[in-house]
Amino acid sequence: MTDLDDLYQDLILDHTRRPRNFHKMPDATSMADGHNRLCGDKLRLYVKVIGGVIQDVAFEGDGCSISKASASMMTEAMKGKTVAEAEALYEKFHTVLTGPPDETPDVPELGKLAAFSGVRKFPVRVKCATLAWHTLSAALKNQGEPVSTE
Ligand code: ZN
């Protein structure tokens, strides 16, 4: 497991240092703000959904390395997914993060996101890792509501 743990550490560090999709999105179809008061993580999530498919996801904000890396990897994972697929992936991610610490999760569909499974050993960090996901879910739910100015 040590090699895998190291690999995961590197992956999380890389996304913390160079977060992907870290910018505003002027043509977003929805957005939501997320705030994890336990840690002080704050982010704004932008999403562009056309025909039920997530075309683009971006975020900005500030927070701890776990929250940033998780947001960064989440945005990469979500592009091209349908809203239903996105919700399903969020469920899986959440389940893996909150599972028993002594079990090794086997969820191949998470791919690189399994890097965060180690977070289950640190319950306080779970909110950091799920913040962006939770916020995306909120943005996707806003989607159908008539909030635009068109
Ligand atoms: Zn945090």
Image: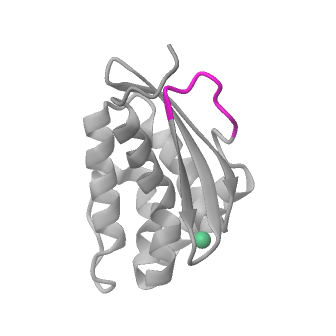
Q: Residue visible at 63% across and 38% down?
A: 21
Q: In which quarter of the image is ligand 1?
A: bottom right
Compared to residue 109, the image places residue 4 above or below, namely: below
- Furthest toward the right, the residue is 17
| Residue 34 percent location from the top left of the image | 54, 56
Q: Is residue 24 magenta?
A: yes
Foreground pick, 56 / 31? 31
Quadrant of res 121: bottom left
In the image, taking residue 26 as reference, residue 36 lies left or right, namely left
In the image, taking residue 76 as reference, residue 80 lies left or right, namely left
| Residue 10 percent location from the top left of the image | 63, 63
Quadrant (top left/top right/bottom left/bottom right) for the N terminus: bottom left
Q: Does the magenta stretch include residue 99?
A: no
Query: Does residue 86 appear in the picture of this structure?
Result: yes
Dominant secondary structure (helix, strand or loop) of the stretch shown in magenta: loop
Q: Residue visible at 56% across and 78% down?
A: 38
Query: Does residue 4 appear in the picture of this structure?
Result: no
Compared to residue 125, the image places residue 137 above or below, namely: above
| Residue 11 percent location from the top left of the image | 59, 58
Compared to residue 74, the image places residue 78 above or below, namely: above
Extent of the magenta region: 23-30
